[in-house]
Structure formats: C-alpha cells, structure tokens
Amino acid sequence: MAVIFRWMVRLTALLIILTVLAVSLVYWLASRSLPDYTDTVEVPGLSAPVEIVRDNANVPHIFGSSDADVFFGLGFAHAQDRMWQMITLRRTAQGRLSEVFGARTLEIDKLLRRFDLHGLARQSVDTLDAKTQNALRAYAAGVNTRLDQINSEALGRGAPEMLLFNAPMAPWRPADSLAIVKLMGLQLSGHLDAEVIRARTSLILPDPDRLMDILPDAPGSGVAALPEYAQIVPDSPRYAENTMPTQHALSPFKRLPFAGASNAWAAAPTRSASGGTLMANDPHLGFTAPAIWYLARLELESGGVIGASIPGLPAIMTGRSEKLGWGLTSAYLDDQDVYIEELNPDDPEEYRTPEGFKKFRSRATIITVKDADPVTVTLRWTDNGPVLPGSHYNLSSITPQGHVTTVNWTVLSAQDTSLSAAMALMEAKSVEEGIAAGEKYIAPAQNLTLVDTSTIAMKMIGAMPRRDANHQSKGRLPTPGWIPENRWQGMMPYTANPEFVAPAGGILGNTNNKTVDRPFPNHVSYLWGDTQRVQRWQRLMQAREVHTRDSFIEAQQDTVSFTARSLLPLIGAELWFTGEAAPDGTPERQRQRALTLLAGWSGEMNEHLPEPLIYAAWLRSLQARLIQDELGPLAQEFTHVQPLFIERVFRDVNGAATWCDVLQSAPNETCSDMARLALDDALLWINETWGTNLESLRWGDAHQATHDHQILGEVPVLRYFVNIRQSTSGGDNTLLRGRTKGSGPDPFFNVHGAGYRGVYDFADPDSSVFVISTGQSGHFLSRHYDDMAQLWRRGEYIPMSLDTDLARAAATGITMLMPAD
C-alpha cells in the first residue's frame, strides 16, 4: 500500500510539473507577441525616420517628415496592437472566415461572397484621388513592415490567436482597408431587416392602424397610407418558419435593434461658458474585446489630428484638429431597397426587367472550409443588386415561389470614395471645408457634426438614392424589381442632404432622431433610430443658458430614462396604491412592494438601484403579452420594447387599446388587466432569477456590459481572461445608452453602446478628453488590454492633447522606424 501511495505522489507531482511547464510554455509563446514599444526598427525603402511616441494610456503620437510616413507609422502601430482584429476584419469582408474557423462560419462567408464587398473595394481603389491612394499604400506598407518583423524575429505570429488558429497571413493591400469601410456599413445597416419585418407584419396585420401601432413612425407629419404588401407582391406566404440562423459572434449582419446608433451635440460660443465652441460625440456599436476603436494622434503636414481610428483604416474617423472637431452619428438614411425578382419559368438563369427577361450576372466561387470539403457557391447579380438567400433576415417568408430577392444599396458601389472624404476632413480648417469634404462620402450614411473655433454645424453625408414619386412602397416594403417606378433613378445631389449651420439657438445635436420632415421622394427616411433619448437631450441642453465641457460630459453620462418617466404613469395609472394590504409571500404583496418602489423612483437607470430592473422586466413582459396572440411566432422578432407602441396602446390612439384584449379568451381584458398580469409575470421572472428581496436587486447585475472576445470568449477558463464584464448604468433609451440583448436567459445584458467618447472644448483644445471602452491593445496579456475599461465604466476620460512636449514627457515608450542603409 505504501508503494502505491509513493507512486501516486510521484505521478501527481509529475502531472503538476508538466502542467506548470505547459502553462509556462504557452505563456512564453503568447507573450512573444507582446510588442516592444521602446524599439528601433530598420525599414527598407523608408525615406526618413518615423517616430511613434506612446503616452501612458498607450495612445501613439506619430511623427514623420511627410503624410505618407505618418500613415506608414499608423499602419505599424495598428498592426502592433490589433493584428488579430485587422486580419479577422479582412477575412470577414473577403468571406474567408471558414478557412480558419471551419463550418461554423460558412453561412457568413456565403453571404459576404454574395455582397462581394472586397471585390467592390478593389474596383474602388482606382477611383480615389492620388492623396488617398498614397495614404493607403503607405499604411499598407506600415502594416506589412510589422508582419515582416513578426516573421523575421519569431514574435509569436503577432498575436496569441494566431498561434491557436494557424493560418497564413497575406500582405496588407489598399483594397483591404476599403473593404473594412464597406464592412462597417454592413454592421450599421438596418433598412433591409426593417423592410422584411414590415412586410411580414403587414401580412398578419392587414389593418393599417394596427400596423402603425407596432411599427410606428417617428412623431411628426404623417405618412400617406401604404398599400398592403400582399397587394404589391401577390401570393406571398402569410406565415413562414423562422429561418434566421443563430448569429455567430463574427457575423456583421446585425438585426434592426443593433443597427448603428450614436450621440453628438455641439454648442456655439454664445452658449458656451468659456466663449469657445464645444462638442461631444459617442458613436455606438456592438461591444467586443478589444473595442473597434483605437485612439491615435497623427502629426500631418496640415497639422495634428487626434481621436478615434478603426484598425485597418488610415484615418481619424472622429476627433479633432487644432481648428476643427468632427463627430459621427448614424443618419438612418434609407439607402437600401429590397426587390422581388421574377424568374423566367422557362429559364431560371433569367429574371424579369422592364425590357423583358435578362440573364443574371453569374460566377462560381469556392469557399475553403477547415476540416471539411470546399463549398462552391454560385453568385448572381441583377441590375438591382445581388441575389440573396431566403435565410437572410427571413427573406423566404415574404418571397413568392418562382421569385428571388435582391437588394440595392449604396455600400455596393464600385466607385466608393468615402475614404477620400475622411482624408479631406482631417485637413479641413473650418466648418465650411468640413462640409465640402463630405461630398465624396458614399456610405454608410452619417450625420457629421462639425465645430470650428466659431461655428457649429451638422450635415448628413452619404449618397442619397433618388426614387420615383410613384414608387409602390416609398421604399418601405420589398417591391417588384421589374417595375421601372420601383427602381432607383440615380443619386440625389449632395446639396439635397440635410444641413444645419450656425442655428439661432446656438445648440445642435443628434441622437439618431428624426432630423427633417420632407415629403417623399425628397425625404431621408421613414425609419429613425431614436424617439426617446432626444427628449432627455433637449431637456438637458435647454436647462442651461451656457454649457461647459463638464456639462457635456454630464449629458453623455446621463442615465435618466424619459421613457420610464412617460410610460410608468400610463401603464400603472389604475394600479398605484390600490387594493388592500396583502400578506407577505403572496403575489399581491410582491406586486404592491414593486409598485411602491416604482412610485418613488426618478427614472434614473442607475446600476445600484432595484427599480430599473423591475421597470425593464415589467415593460418587456407587457409588450410580450400585448403582441403574442396577434403576431404569433412573429412576436419573437420584437425583442425590444417599442415605447411608441406602448404609448399608443395605453392612450388608445386610433383604437390601439384593442391590443390589450386577448383574442383567444372569452373575457374582454382591459389595458389595466394587461399591466397587472405583466407585472406579475415580471416579478415571477425576477423571483426565479434574482430572488424575492426586491429592495436588494441591482440593475447593474442584470445590465452587465459584455465586452467579449469574438472567438475566445466562449472557451472555458480562457473566457475569464479575455472577456471584460462590467456592471453598468443606463439602458435602451438613456443618453448613456446601454442597448440590452433582448433575448436569451440574460435579456438585459448591455451589448451595444458607446465604444468611444470624446468631448472637445475649443476655448482650450488641450483640455479636451476622450476614452474607449476597453484598451488600446488587442493582446489579452497586455496591461493595455483593459486599462481604460474601468475609466469608461466610471464615466472618466483621459486628456486629448496635441501638445508634442506633453506627449514626450508622458512617454512610456518610443518606437523609431529608421530607413535601412
């Protein structure tokens, strides 16, 4: 027995030693790819030295003798910190994820091949001006220099993920950067999904008033009644199986609730306490680790610029120079139209056009799949755009037999000069020059907020489709692609894009709200991203005669929900302080406790309070009860509370209270009945999930920000090292926007919000501040992987200075790129 025990001890010790050695080896290999920020690298072909000064937040300040050298340095810095992210973005745009990740990303690749983003990007390179082409070439050379350094010095393939997913890395090309611009457009698009949902809903709800309830227009002048989808496209299936596959973390195809969002606002000197212009911007995208944004300062020949870049792109997308600040918000321009294309019954390789049947433009493409056979996909394009599979956003559910669907979309331009606009914007010295720079911008459409030292402005940038006044659905529903009136008639002139310069009130801004109300076809959109945050923003802006940098920061961090303040009195009107006291432990007692808490609540979605969780669960359960019987399985598509829908129902706008009656039951339920039953549903869910002590609930426990690694985030054990989870305040409809997941066991997880925040004060530009939601590095062993995450969560910022001496004084490393002899 003693011998067995001794051998067990020896084997256990051996296993421990082997485990420690294995972990040490993995750590050593992974740490080899950590960049050395104090280094000198000789670069063949470089004409003059390039200096990359890293401040204590790891923001690179890049200096060179020419713009080309500076963009070379940015490419090198991006590749040092975000190599895996850049390569993954490129593979996504190319439709080549399956070469690395196998069959689980095959559907993503098939869709991306159909859109041909990378092919269109290659065609667009030659349409760019010489300055932009030179910047792209210099940037690519900088990226490739880092790749060469990784290969020559055996630096762990540049990122830990490269060791785990061993795949060749092709050199970076200018078209790769343009493809990422188009990929961002894909992530920000929502009109295709909206058209399909509207069509599917109209097939179930032929009453236009009820359709207007659940899919309401933003407040403002009404829209002329639309024809029923069944009239436009006869023989459409009324009910269809939900064919939308579960989305992979790498999928760029975001559902409508997660289309682009953002905040931006500006104050003129007359509304600024400092006497200079002010601006704040926080663009919203899905959370990832690392964030999509990367902070950088570029010292160009035209002057310094600093702000947020996107790895893979040689530009500061939102930020400031000494004279100009610029910010972006999603414009919600209707730049997508879905078409139903009729196939020739005698030849399925032809589709109907206004001139008769015509051959598809077709070609085959082969997708290499790791650990599986290659897959061949036939790509087909029409005059209206690419043919899409029926599984994409449930297109099959609104497509009659003998037809296919296509999409026309400004992102699918082969003459995309959007990056030239970004280059010109970095050189602009005034609002006027900034607006002029936007003319070259194609997609995705954005509201460009601008401030110079004396003027504020907002201009929508992006190509605006010209539609025929007789378009059957005004672009709101899929329409037959062979009818001339449904087809695009080119693009509107840039002067038609909405523009606001030096408003009399001295304040302007955008929260993705409706900006103009113009009749079709000169409208911008019927779909807008916000009807709620703008209400709170208006209140905060008008509450002060003058603003400061700090008051703009307070607005960015504001967590008061206008939606909660406006809806709770409606839905609880007949429930507050009614009924006799109920015994402890009964549903009635729990309901009374919840109502008492909500009655004294200010509507602040603070992470430490219980009321936001009770409110959010109540509204979610209420909407589910209201729509389930009318919409059936389609109710699953409405994952987030529609505030205007709830308001219409409880105010009985045009008979909307009929939603409160359950069709399958004999009694005639009232809206008060629905509110009470929904609150009981919500409390039952809370009791089962979070416990029965309502007073001890914390909204932040349910509303965790999920900055997850898109690939390693689900790997056991490793996920605790690569995912960044934080308790957060805010919600779907607060200025501090934390868009909730809306489905699954954790419906209130915060999955979409401000990955970058910047506030610029042109009375003292170097007092401007910014922050990103994770850290500069994409390497999870780096201290800069998450060093800004807690600052971001607490509402703190870091300085945004163009002071060269300050950057050098705070330098934690200087990389010199030197010309090789």
Image (cartoon, rainbow, N blue to C red):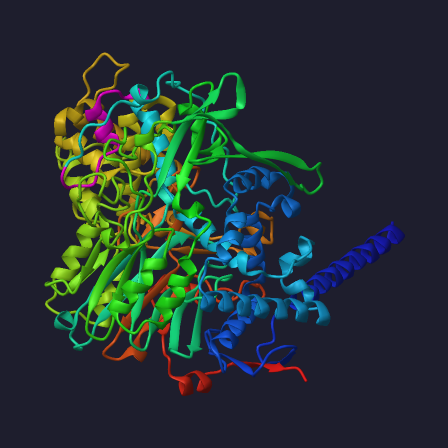
The total of numbered circles placed on residues is: 0
**Residue 122 seen in the current view:** yes
Is 678 in front, or is 723? 723
> Which residue is located at x 19 percent, y 70 percent?
455
Residue 676 rendering spot, x and y as whole percentages? 22, 30
Name the quarter where the C terminus is drawn: bottom right
Choose between 256 and 785: the one closer to the eye: 256
Image quarter for residue 664?
A: top left
Query: Which residue is at the front of the view, 363 or 546?
Result: 363
Q: Magenta segment, which residues?
A: 203-221
- For residue 494, which quarter of the picture? bottom left
Q: Name the spot of residue 279 as percent of width and height, x first.
A: 25, 67
Q: Is residue 446 above or below residue 386?
A: below
Q: Residue at x 26, y 42 (%)?
A: 525
* Image coords of residue 155 (percent x, y): 68, 68
Residue ranking furthest to the right: 3
Q: Nearer the viewer, residue 675 or 258?
A: 258
Figure check: 279 above or below 201 = below
The answer to whether any part of residue 736 appears in the image is: no
- Residue 598 is inside the magenta segment: no
Q: Is residue 596 toward the left or the right of residue 505 in the image?
A: right
Return the x and y of residue 113 as percentages of the image width and height.
55, 41
* Vertical relation: 630 (above or below) 372: above
Q: Is residue 340 left or right of residue 675?
A: right
On whether residue 212 falls in the magenta region, the answer is yes
Furthest toward the top, the residue is 666
In the rendered image of this protein, does residue 792 appear above or below residue 752? Answer: below
Specify the quadrant of the image occupied by residue 481.
Answer: top left
As drawn, the residue found furthest toward the front would be 355
